[in-house]
Image (spheres, rainbow, N blue to C red):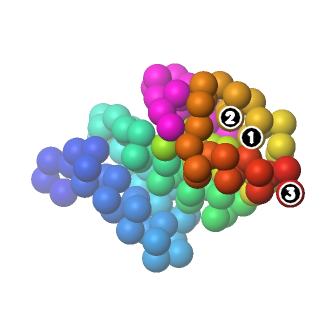
Amino acid sequence: MPQPNVVSFTSLISRYVSTARPDTALWLFGRMFDSLVLPNEFTFATVINACSTLADLETSKKIHARIEISGVQKNLVVCSSLVDMYGKYNDVGGARRVFDLMGGGNVVSWTSMIAAYA
């Protein structure tokens, strides 16, 4: 890409996740920072999905830390993705912490939280 931006990176990352290549999606996410392009809430939600697919808790926690640093930790889409991710790892405590910090959820986050308890 001659001049990559957050939209082009997020689109490519999303495509890699949807074509069952989450490892490539995470690699590309790392390249974003090398290109000095900062992720947005949609990028983070997509990358969280890639982590969930790989069942890579360590990487997931690193992504969660980046979310906290970036300032999008209260975004409903990002939080719902995090609740779902922690639920898939059977980390009900982690899912509940994110859910409680959301300050209100939607059908997706409530469903993810209920599934975490199931």
Q: State if disc 2 and disc 1 touch (CB < 8 Å).
A: yes
Give the alpha-carbon distance from disc 3 to disc 1, as whole Å: 12 Å
Residue type at numbered disc 3: Ala
Q: Quick check: 33 above or below 10?
A: above
Q: State if disc 2 and disc 3 touch (CB < 8 Å).
A: no
- Badge 3: few (under 14), some or many (20 or more) residues near its Cα, within 10 Å? few
Which residue has dot 1 on it? 95
Q: Residue at x 59, y 37 (%)?
A: 105
Q: Which residues are magenta?
A: 57-76
Q: Is residue 80 magenta?
A: no
Q: Secondary structure at mark 3?
A: loop
Quarter-of-image position of residue 53: bottom right
Which residue has dot 3 on it? 118
Residue type at numbered disc 2: Phe
Q: Which badge, 3 or 1, is on the more N-terminal residue?
A: 1
Relative image position of residue 112 (x, y in whole percent): 68, 52
Please give left or right for residue 42 compared with residue 27 in the image: left
